[in-house]
Structures are given as structure tokens and as C-alpha cells.
Image: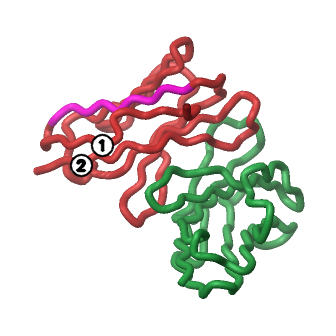
Amino acid sequence: KNEVEQSPQNLTAQEGEFITINCSYSVGISALHWLQQHPGGGIVSLFMLSSGKKKHGRLIATINIQEKHSSLHITASHPRDSAVYICAVRGETSGSRLTFGEGTQLTVNP
Amino acid sequence: NAGVMQNPRHLVRRRGQEARLRCSPMKGHSHVYWYRQLPEEGLKFMVYLQKENIIDESGMPKERFSAEFPKEGPSILRIQQVVRGDSAAYFCASSPLVGQVSGYTFGSGTRLTVV
């Protein structure tokens, strides 16, 4: 079992829909990152969380440390949101390196 | 501040050649991490370096791969005698001081193709 599990693996939505991507992890962490990767492109850091909730534009990220679970929400989704969304954790005992989930491929259709 | 700079963006090498991938961290960042993304797979940690020191290389293959972060200049990931299985996207990230939660930034990656 991977230390970081994401669901769903693939997600197709219609423009305007509310989207949720989930991330569960099995180790103690000091921080959790949500990343975005476009095809052939680089990796953009969307959020870094150690507790609570963060919001940036149409994106919201939450984390529940006790339940070892985080969610990324996209409100009013748009085709330009189509990308791979990756959850990554920084373990308490792994220094600053990250352990990644397999990613969620999101496709938003017009 | 140009962010984390990786070059080249794309690199093609024949089997047996050497590949050198460069990463210049963000200004003020003294920690560099290399990650590899094999085709159709997730990102995997390779190595963590500070200036002139390798801190954690537990993700590096034992042979043919090496990394350095000299006092001056970029961090270099070196792959000797490349094989087809080395074809992947190699990402570099940098961060400021250890323990500082914010500031973890990725480069755009180098896509290595071995032919």
C-alpha cells in the first residue's frame, strides 16, 4: 500500500461543476502539498497545508490531521482546470523530501 | 526572481552516453531536491542536497547516477551510460531553510529521452 493514496484516479466533469479530489496518507506528516501538472508542463504548487483550510480563487484545500486526510475542491470548474492534481506529503521523519500520490487526471469539458 | 531554473528542457541521448541535468534554485534557497517521473508513473524522490553536501540519496539508483550541488553554480544530476529505462522527466525543487514550511518550489523539469 502506498503511503499516499489519491482518489479518484480519473475524473471527468462538465464546466461549472464542483469538483473534489481526495488524498489519504498513512504516515505522520509535517506538511501536505497539492500540486498541479499540465501535460508536458512543469509542476505548480497550489497549496501547502499543515492544518485547517486554505482558499485561493476557486480552489479550496482542507486537511484533517487526525484522520490523515485532505481534499482539494474546485468550484465552478473550467476547461483550463484540466490537469493532473497531485497530493504530496512531507513526513515527520523524512526531512524535507516529499512522497507523492499517483495523481488525479481531471478533464473538464465545455 | 526567476524561480527554479532547469535546463535543458528536453535532452536526447543515445544509449551509453552521459546526461547532465542542471538546476538553479530560487534565490535564497539552499536546499535542492531531485525527483524523477517515469512514463505513466508518479513522482519519486531521488536525492536531497545542500551546498557541497548530499543529505539524503536514498532514492538514487546505486549505479550510474550521481548528484552534486557545488558552492558556486547549479546543482547537477549526472547519469552515466544512459539506458532506455532512464527516459523520464526529472524535476528539481528548492526550499529555504530546513524546517521552514513554506517556499517549496518546483522547476519546469528536464525531459530525457534515450534513443
Q: Amino acid at mark 2?
A: Thr
Q: Residue at x 49, y 17 (%)?
A: A64
Label annotation for residue A95: none
Residue with the mark numbered 2: A107
Q: Which is more toward the observer, A97 or B106?
A: A97
Chain bearing mark 2: A
Residue with the mark numbered 1: A10
Chain coloured green here: B
* C-alpha separation, residue under disc 1 versus residue under disc 2: 8 Å
Image: magenta residue range: A17-25
Quick check: can you spot residue B103?
Answer: yes
Marks 1 and 2 on same chain: yes
Q: Residue at x 85, y 56 (%)?
A: B54
Q: Could you say where residue B21 lies in the image, as x and y percent from the top left?
A: 66, 74
Chain A, colour shown: red
Could you tell me which quadrant the N terminus of chain B lies in?
Answer: bottom right
**Mark in front: 1 vs 2:** 1
B26 in relation to A28, above or below: below
